[in-house]
C-alpha cells in the first residue's frame, strides 16, 4: 500500500494547452513521456465500492496492465491524500484475489464485481524539481464513457513524489495566476459513476448549516460543476469563506465569485474565469 498526495485541476481544452505551455516555460520543469491510458472501473450492481468511496480499476498503458484500488482519503490544505494499492497484471481480467487481501475485500461480495465505466485519455507528463521536491504533473485529455454516453475530460494533476508538500500548492497557485483552472474535488471515478447513473450527490452537504464552511464550499462547488448547475447561496451563506478569503488576500476574487453565484451563473461557466481557481486555491491552502 502507498499514499498519494495530489492537487487536481479541471479546465477547458484550450486552457489545458495554455497550461502545458506555461509549465514547460518554467524553470525546473522538464517534459516527460506521453502515453495513452485506457481505464476500466469495476463495481457491484449495487455500487458497493462507490458507497464506500472506493475506486477499483484496471489501467492499460501499451502492453502493460495495472490493477489499482484507491480510497477517497482526505482533503488537507488544498491536496488530496489517499491510500492506494497497485498490482501488475498479465491482461485485462480483474484479479479479485488481490482485492480480497485488502481491508476493502472484507466488506464486498467480490464475485459481483463487473465493469461500470471507462476513462480513456492521453497523458502528457511534466516533471518538476524544486527545492528538494519532486512533482509529477499529469496533463490528461480524453473522455469518460458509460452507458453509451460520454463527457470530456481535461485535467492537470500535480502529484508529490518526494519532498515538502507546500510545493504542490505553490505550483498550482502559480498556474492559476496565468490560466483559468478549477480545483476539483470530484475524482474521475465519481464523474464516471455520475455518468453511469450510479452516483447523484447533493450539491449542498447534509451536515452543513445555512452557513457553508470552507471545505463545504469547495466540495459543493465541485458537485455543482459535475452536475452543470449553480451553487445556490444567499447573501449570508459564505461568511466563513469571505473571512478566509480576506485573511489570504483574495477579497476581490471572492467578490467576483460571490456576485456570479448570486446571479445564478453555473459553476462550469464561472470556472472559465481566473477568479474562481485563484479563490479556491487561496482558501484551500489554510
Image (tube, helix red, strand yellow):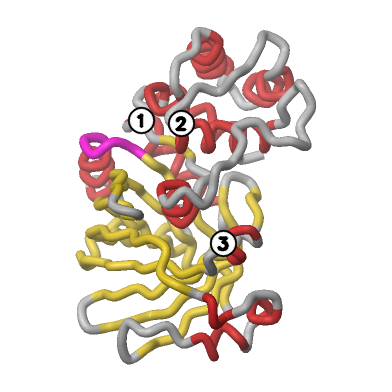
* Magenta residue span: 11-15
Q: Considering depth in this image, is 176 or 99 the residue closer to the camera?
A: 99
For the question of whether residue 258 can be seen, the reply is yes
Rendering quarter of residue 80:
bottom right
Q: Is residue 132 visible?
A: no
Residue 247 location in percent, x, y?
68, 24
On the image, the x and y values in percent for residue 26 come to 29, 47
Q: Is residue 201 above or below residue 32?
A: above
N-terminal label among 3 and 1: 3
Q: Main secondary structure of the magenta part?
A: helix
Residue closest to the eye, 259 or 178 = 259
Q: Is residue 183 magenta?
A: no
On screen, residue 22 versus residue 78, left or right, reads left
Q: Which mark is residue 47?
A: 3
Instruction: Kindly report which numbered mark, 2 or 3, lies closer to the viewer in this rendering.
Output: 3
Q: Is residue 139 above or below residue 226?
A: below
User: Which residue bears the numbered disc 2?
Assistant: 277
Indicate which disc residue 180 carries.
1
Front position in the image: 226 or 159: 226
Q: Is disc 3 in contact with disc 1, using a CB cutoff of under 8 Å?
A: no
Say which element carries label 3: loop
Amino acid at each position: 500500500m502507498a499514499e498519494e498526495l495530489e492537487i487536481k485541476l479541471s479546465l477547458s481544452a484550450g486552457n489545458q494547452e495554455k497550461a502545458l505551455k506555461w509549465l514547460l516555460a518554467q524553470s525546473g520543469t522538464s517534459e516527460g513521456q506521453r502515453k495513452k491510458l485506457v481505464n476500466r472501473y469495476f463495481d457491484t450492481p449495487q455500487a458497493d465500492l462507490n458507497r464506500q468511496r472506493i475506486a477499483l480499476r484496471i489501467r492499460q498503458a501499451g502492453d502493460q496492465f495495472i490493477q489499482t484500488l484507491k480510497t477517497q482519503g482526505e482533503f488537507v490544505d488544498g491536496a488530496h491524500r489517499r491510500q492506494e494499492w497497485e498490482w501488475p497484471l498479465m491482461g485485462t481480467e480483474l484479479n479479485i484475489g488481490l482485492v480480497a487481501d485488502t481491508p476493502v475485500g472484507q466488506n464486498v461480495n467480490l464475485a459481483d464485481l463487473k465493469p461500470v465505466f471507462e476513462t480513456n485519455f492521453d497523458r502528457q507528463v511534466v516533471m518538476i524539481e524544486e527545492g528538494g521536491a519532486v512533482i509529477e504533473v499529469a496533463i490528461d485529455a480524453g473522455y469518460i464513457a458509460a452507458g453509451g454516453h460520454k463527457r470530456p475530460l481535461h485535467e492537470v494533476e500535480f502529484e508529490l513524489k518526494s519532498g515538502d508538500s507546500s510545493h504542490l500548492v505553490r505550483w498550482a497557485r502559480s498556474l492559476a495566476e496565468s490560466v483559468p483552472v478549477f480545483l476539483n474535488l470530484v475524482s474521475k471515478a465519481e464523474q464516471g459513476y455520475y455518468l453511469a447513473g450510479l452516483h447523484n450527490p447533493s450539491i449542498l452537504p447534509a451536515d452543513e448549516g445555512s452557513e457553508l464552511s470552507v471545505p463545504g464550499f469547495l466540495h459543493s462547488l465541485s458537485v455543482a460543476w459535475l452536475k452543470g448547475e449553480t451553487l445556490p447561496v444567499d447573501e449570508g451563506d459564505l461568511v466563513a469563506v469571505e473571512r478566509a478569503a480576506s485573511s489570504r488576500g483574495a477579497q476581490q476574487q471572492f467578490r467576483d465569485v460571490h456576485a456570479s453565484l448570486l446571479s445564478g451563473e453555473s459553476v462550469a461557466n464561472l470556472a472559465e474565469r481566473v477568479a474562481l481557481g485563484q479563490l479556491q486555491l487561496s482558501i484551500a491552502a489554510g
